[in-house]
Image (cartoon, rainbow, N blue to C red):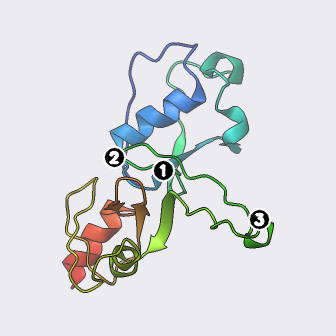
Amino acid sequence: SGNTVELEKLECNVTIETLIAKVEAAFQCSGDESCQLIWGTQHLGQTDKARTLKTLGFEVQTQLMCVHTLRDKSTCPTCRAASEKLEALNHVPRGHQPQRATVLRDVNIGAVHEGWGRKWNACMYSCMHCQLAINSHEKVNACNICRCFWHKSCKTARAQRGRL
């Protein structure tokens, strides 16, 4: 039981990466929401992304299971800045400032707002995906380049608002 999506007119040369993107669009995934595809007992993961439907042996009317997950997508939805791996503080040369992460994960807006030189208690932001106002206690993602915020899961944020 669950939701069903049918994708039509998929060519045999479509990659798993493209298929995942189409499934995520059909399920309206946003933020760090993603779809993990499972074919029989095979988990279609990172190593399969470049493979095509043909090389995997998919046939017409092949059915897949989709599990909704949260995974770090590592890019800002506004400026597309990528999250880069930072050097450990003990590897930063003496006299140099440690590099600040571009994309921040699991932060609250007050702390990040203050880190940007603004007052922690005077900030109001909306999610870049769903436009829902972000509460000061919510854990969200942020971009240090364009200074925006977004929910890890807009669906979860909306559901939690409904319970308050």
Tell me the SS state at disc 1: strand
Helix, strand or loop at mark 3? loop
Tell me the kind of residue under disc 3. Pro
User: Which comes sooner in the sequence, label 3 or label 1?
Assistant: 1
Q: Quadrant of the C terminus?
A: bottom left
State the image quarter where residue 161 is shown. Answer: bottom left
Q: Amino acid at mark 2?
A: Thr
Q: Earlier in the sequence, mark 1 or mark 2?
A: 1
Residue 137 lies left or right of residue 63; in this view the side is left
Q: Is residue 39 left or right of residue 106?
A: right
Give residue 37's position: percent from left, percent from top: 57, 43
Tag nearer the camera, 3 or 2:
3
Q: Residues within 10 Å of mark 2 (few under 14, many from 20)?
A: some
- The residue singled out by tag 3 in the image is 93
Residue 158 lies in quadrant:
bottom left
Quick check: marks 3 and 2 in contact, CB under 8 Å? no
Q: Which mark is residue 14?
A: none
At a point 67% along the width and 65% down the height, the residue shown is: 96
* Residue under numbered circle 1: 34
Mark 2 = which residue? 78
Q: How many C-alpha atoms fall within 10 Å of the one at disc 3: few (<14), some, or many (≥20)? A: few
Tell me what residue is drawn at x 58 percent, y 13 percent. Answer: 13
**Residue 22 to residue 149: above or below:** above
Instruction: Give me the residue at 24% from left, 56% from top.
Output: 130
Q: CA distance from mark 3 to mark 1?
A: 38 Å
